[in-house]
Every structure is written in structure tokens, then in C-alpha cells.
Amino acid sequence: MKFSIAEYADMIFFYGKANGKPTEARRMYTEAYPRRRIPDARVFPATFARLRETITINKSMQDSVAGFDRNIERSVMEYLEEDPTTSVRKIS
């Protein structure tokens, strides 16, 4: 079961407040939200890393952020590797 966006945001908040210490972040999160489902300590750094790398929180959103398609990105990069002098208009 996934966490809500608000829960992920709170995890990132406590991860930062704990200076990147997952166990401390989990302890603070548990104190602040005793009635919520408590994530494993590994979820805190994983969520933070996912946000930094993909600008998303939810794994299912990674390939569809604002219409962004990773397959198109790969195709463009391959095309540029083959012919780095090509124009942007031609690639599009």
C-alpha cells in the first residue's frame, strides 16, 4: 500500500529535520503521527532520493510527470549521439 502525497511530504520534512538520519526521522514521524501507518526507516532516504532524481514522490508517477515520456527522451538522446549536428526542428 502506497503512502499519500501528504505522508511522503511529512517523511521528507522529518528526514531533513533529522539531518538525514533515517532512524531519527522515523522516531520523530512516529511521535508526530501516532495514528498513521509508520514507514520503515528505509522509506525516508528512498523517498528523498526519488524526489531529487525524478521530481516525483510516487513511483507510479515517474514516467508521466507533466506529460514527460522517458521513451521519447531516450530516442532523442540516441538520435543526437548518432548525429550531434542535427537541428532541434529536425529532431522534433
Image (tube, grey):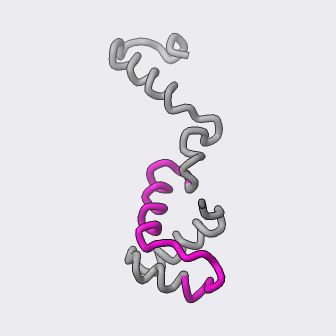
Position of 37 compared to 15: left or right? right
Count of marks, rendered view: 0
Q: Residue furthest bottom?
A: 31
The x and y percentages for residue 71 are 50, 27
On screen, residue 30 above or below 41 = below
On screen, residue 82 above or below 55 = above
**Which residues are drawn in magenta?**
30-56
**Residue shown at the point (52%, 69%) measured from the top left:** 12
The x and y percentages for residue 31 are 56, 89
Looking at the rendering, in which quadrant would you find the C terminus?
A: top right
The x and y percentages for residue 1 are 60, 61
Task: Identify the image quadrant of residue 83.
Answer: top left
The x and y percentages for residue 9 are 59, 67
Position of 31 compared to 74: left or right? right
In the image, residue 9 lies in the stretch drawn in magenta: no
**Residue shown at the point (48%, 61%) measured from the top left:** 47
On screen, residue 27 above or below 64 = below
Q: Residue furthest front?
A: 1
On screen, residue 77 above or below 56 = above
**Residue shown at the point (42%, 12%) measured from the top left:** 86
Q: Nearer the viewer, residue 87 or 59?
A: 59
